[in-house]
């Protein structure tokens, strides 16, 4: 019998210098993932960067066909374009692929995964995944906001009949990675100095502003992200609750997402009963009106923070739910949990 504690798994982290890549590396250490060998891979500009893992120095390397040799996992925390250009190398090497860039979610062999909330969205496997195989070697990590909305509606559907739902989501620039962070920072500094602001990433002014679309020379990324969130919610819920109407806006914040969700039930209910239904991991709900969640408070948290449920004065069975989440942390945690499930399955077979 093999001791599961002695088993180790080689892992390639693509996009190691990205926000999500750094968070994945941190979580692998924090959660004691049994890494045998960790290969840090990234774009040319990051080659040679010195970092560390498990108190040992590590250097970010260029990606090549031999990069995935003897690797069990390939986690793609890179940009969508970099993922699309290189993921088939990992596939050819027989790696278990975990896509954090969400660029492969339309691939016919991909499986959308959200271990953080799947237990709350009962029924999504049979009706939401269709013919997709849970043992697929290509797992796509669900969008963090989709996990939040699907998890909330899954919780409510256990106790109430949900008639309709709508959510406005405020997206931070960290969803665009370090280039988004850097451009908002430069825009803010230049605006305060009465200088011309850069618009390379967003094609528009984000600082001190809200956007429903980007500049005319930029692709409709917000609309694409909005459609992706809706698609992920639909797949995770699998018809257990009504599909929410979703509106995604670009907010002038660096880190963390926020959302305001309206839910209408078939019958009136007390806010306390709805709060009780929502008090499930990974949600943490604050009933204190003087201590409500915000994006600063949620930074670095693995939980989705919810505020006190507020009745809508014009709709007898309508309620508003405010929530915040650390999009980078939640995405990375979801990816690591996908890998952990595979590890548990492997150690079970080995033992």
Image (tube, rainbow, N blue to C red):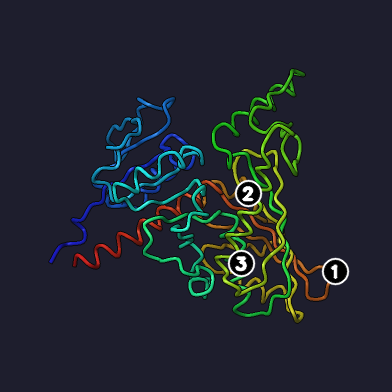
Residue 331 position in % (x across, y down)? 50, 51
Work out whether residue 17 or residue 225 is closer to the camera in this orientation and state it: 225
Mark linked to residue 152: 3
Assess disc 2: are there few (<14), some (14-19) or many (≥20) residues with their C-alpha within 10 Å of its C-alpha: some
For this rendering, which residue is in front, 177 or 313?
177
According to the picture, the residue beneath numbered tag 1 turns out to be 313
Disc 1 residue crowd, few under 14, some 14–19, many 20+, Cα 10 Å: few
Indicate the position of residue 46 as horizontal and vertical percent values: 42, 27
Residue 328, x across and y down, in percent: 52, 46
Residue annotated with mark 2: 225
- Label 1 – label 3 distance at C-alpha: 22 Å
Disc 2, SS: helix
Dot 1 or dot 2: first in sequence order is 2
Q: Residue furthest right?
A: 314
Q: Nearer the viewer, residue 18 or 134?
A: 134
Residue 319 vertical position relative to residue 176 in the rendered view, above or below:
below
Q: Is residue 297 left or right of residue 50?
A: right
Whether label 1 touches label 3, CB < 8 Å: no
């Amino acid at each position: 019998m093999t001791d599961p504690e002695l088993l180790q798994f080689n892992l390639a982290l693509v996009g190691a210098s990205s926000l999500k890549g750094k968070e994945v590396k941190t979580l692998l250490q924090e959660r004691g993932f049994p890494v045998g060998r960790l290969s840090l891979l990234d774009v040319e500009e990051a080659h040679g960067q010195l970092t560390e893992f498990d108190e040992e120095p590590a250097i970010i390397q260029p990606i090549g066909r031999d990069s995935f040799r003897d690797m069990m996992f390939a986690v793609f925390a890179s940009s969508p374009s970099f993922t699309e250009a290189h993921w088939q190398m990992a596939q050819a090497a027989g790696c278990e692929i975990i896509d954090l860039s969400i660029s492969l979610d339309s691939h016919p062999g991909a499986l959308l995964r959200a271990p953080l909330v799947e237990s709350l969205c009962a029924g999504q496997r049979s009706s939401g995944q269709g013919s997709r195989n849970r043992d697929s070697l290509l797992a796509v990590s669900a969008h963090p906001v989709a996990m939040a909305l699907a998890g909330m509606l899954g919780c409510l559907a256990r106790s109430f009949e949900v008639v309709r739902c709508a959510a406005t989501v405020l997206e931070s620039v960290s969803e665009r990675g370090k280039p988004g962070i850097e451009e908002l920072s430069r825009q803010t500094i230049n605006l305060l100095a009465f200088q011309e602001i850069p618009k390379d990433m967003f094609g528009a002014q984000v600082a001190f502003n809200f956007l429903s679309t980007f500049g005319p020379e930029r692709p409709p990324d917000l609309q694409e992200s909005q459609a992706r969130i809706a698609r992920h919610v639909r797949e995770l819920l699998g018809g257990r609750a009504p599909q929410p109407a979703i509106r995604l806006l670009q907010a002038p914040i660096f880190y963390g997402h926020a959302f305001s969700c309206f839910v209408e039930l078939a019958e009136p209910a007390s806010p306390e009963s709805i709060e009780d239904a929502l008090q499930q991991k990974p949600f943490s709900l604050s009933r204190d009106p003087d201590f409500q969640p915000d994006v600063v408070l949620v930074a670095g948290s693995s939980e989705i923070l919810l505020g006190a449920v507020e009745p809508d004065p014009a709709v007898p069975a309508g309620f508003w739910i405010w929530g915040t989440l650390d999009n980078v942390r939640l995405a990375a945690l979801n990816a690591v949990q996908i890998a952990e499930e595979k590890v548990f399955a492997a150690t079970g077979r080995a033992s």
